[in-house]
Amino acid sequence: MMDLQRTREVASRVEELEEVGSTNAALRVLAVDADGWPHLSVLLTANQTAGRGRLDRTWSAPAGSALAVSVVLRRLPDDPEARGWIPLAAGVAMTDAVAEQLPDHTVAVKWPNDVLVDGRKICGILAEATGDAVIVGSGVNTAMTRAELPVPTATSFAVLGATVDVDRLLTTYLERLSASIEALAEPGDAVSSGLHADAVERCATLGLDVRVSLPGGRFLEGGAETIDEDGRLVVRAGDETHAVSAGDVVHVRPAQP
């Protein structure tokens, strides 16, 4: 079992499983018990065998090579549109947590919520609504070797020559995530809370040419200009701008001036 003393001081509840198919799926079942699994409760494992991502993608990783952690959020904004910021809030929080342990590398968010180190993916995040709560799952490549990386565009702490302090990583992540969600839940919005500025500052997607897979098999290609006040990615294609609320984004190359 992991030493998670500091994490337990921040989280309402922490449960570690030796093995689980998906921490998000498992927590969805457990979270029905709101009293037993209050706001900022955590379920985690170093052996997730059927992880899930956006667009129903699934994957697995060698035991002990990655950290899967899911958090239940219950103190949510009343405004449904403000809740759309939760994935970005998680991405910003995990970016800060990873950057804290990799000070000599460039750590950033790929819109809407992947975490990149030097342009390579080290963490994916999936937020799912369940009843009156939201479950945020994160998969962090910790001890994964280069041969174990799922794709050439991925990386891990081990590949970067670092040994991750999981307790420190989770503590920083939960503190930053909790603060962002509480700020969103108060009167105001992502702009007044500072989350919008934090997301724009940490977003690696901005300034790049991108290809966005949209619902219905459509694609949008153009330059990623900014994140708007609703958390949407603003892409300029020719003389028009498009605000994308959901889509699979591929970084193509630096945008042309």
Image (cartoon, rainbow, N blue to C red):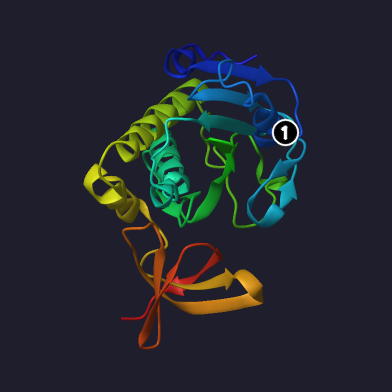
How many numbered discs, if any? 1
Specify the farthest residue to the left: 192
Determine whether, in the image, residue 36 is placed left or right of residue 111: right
| Whole-percent x, y for residue 257 in the image | 30, 81
| Whole-percent x, y for residue 133 in the image | 53, 34
| Whole-percent x, y for residue 243 in the image | 41, 70
Q: In which quarter of the image is residue 193?
A: top left
Badge 1 density bin: few <14, some 14–19, many ≥20, Cα 10 Å:
many
The quarter of the picture where the N terminus appears is top right
Tell me which residue sits at (52%, 20%) in the image.
38
Q: Quadrant of residue 204?
A: bottom left
Which residue is nearer to you in this view: 128 or 90?
A: 128
Tell me which residue sits at (76%, 34%) in the image.
21
Compared with 133, 253 (above or below) is below
Specify the farthest residue to the bottom: 239
Compared with 205, 39 (above or below) is above
Determine whether, in the image, residue 146 is placed left or right of residue 198: right
| Whole-percent x, y for residue 8 in the image | 49, 14
Tell me the kind of residue under disc 1.
Answer: Gln
Tag 1, which secondary structure? loop
**Mark 1, residue position:** 48
